[in-house]
Image (cartoon, grey):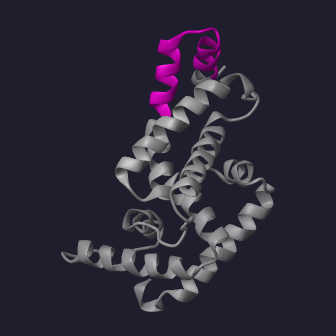
Amino acid sequence: MSEDNILLQKSLAGDQTAFDLLISRYLKIIYSVALHYVKDADEASDVAQDAVIKIWKNLKRFDQDKNFKPWVVRIVSNTALDWLKKKKPLLFSELEIEDADALAAVLPDPTPSANAELERRELAQAVKQAMDLLPKQDRIILHLRYELELTFKEIGEQLGKAMETVKSRHARAILKLKTLLDPKEF
């Protein structure tokens, strides 16, 4: 039995400390997802807090045969989307530089030098600009894969799509991204 499942069992039995430990394991992800959607640190904290309450209230509904992380990400995403619907129109447009940095980290860097940090930032900016040109679904898949480090199976569960569909969309998104970037950047 995984540590998450042990903490889940204890939480369901009313052990508040176990629930606190369980949430602390996912707090960074919860906040990161909230911030990705609302783009404001204070609002992201509020969304994260609302999401934790929803997780607590719905813990009995969690299917323990599944992975806990995608379930948490889905609750936070839905909470953030509800928050945005109440606050303002939903904007999926821009990824933060940090998101682009995570994606740029998978691109090879053949010539590390004293200017590596500047080159990395320039590449990250180019990736961010190229990401802005991708369809929303492709940006979401790349964000879930590289920023939140979800597996293809977890992304499929999150988006309600087959794992093979997610893999092929991911591969196509990477190819689109490469064609949008200047080949000299590789």
The N terminus: image quadrant: top right
Q: Which of the pair 33/166 is nearer the observer?
A: 33
Q: Position of residue 138 (x, y in %)?
A: 64, 70
Read off the magenta span. Answer: 5-26
Does 98 appear in magenta?
no
Is 113 above or below relative to 99?
below
Q: Position of residue 85 (x, y in %)?
A: 59, 56
The C terminus: image quadrant: bottom left
> Which residue is drawn at the image coordinates 47% and 31% (left, top)?
25
Q: Position of residue 50 (x, y in %)?
A: 51, 37
> Which secondary structure is most common in the magenta stretch?
helix
Q: Quadrant of residue 177?
A: bottom right
Q: Which of the pair 146/48 is nearer the observer?
A: 48
> Which residue is drawn at the image coordinates 69% and 50% (left, top)?
158
Q: Quadrant of residue 68?
A: top right
Number of numbered labels in the structure image: 0
Q: Is residue 124 left or right of residue 77?
A: left
> Which residue is drawn at the image coordinates 66% and 39% (left, top)?
71
Q: Is residue 56 left or right of residue 24?
A: right
Identity of the residue furthest to the left in this view:
114
Q: Position of residue 10 (x, y in %)?
A: 60, 11
Is 112 above or below relative to 85?
below
Q: Quadrant of residue 174?
A: bottom right
Does 15 appear in magenta?
yes
> Which residue is drawn at the image coordinates 58% and 65% (left, top)?
142
Q: Which of the pair 70/149 is nearer the observer?
A: 70
Is 104 above or below relative to 22?
below
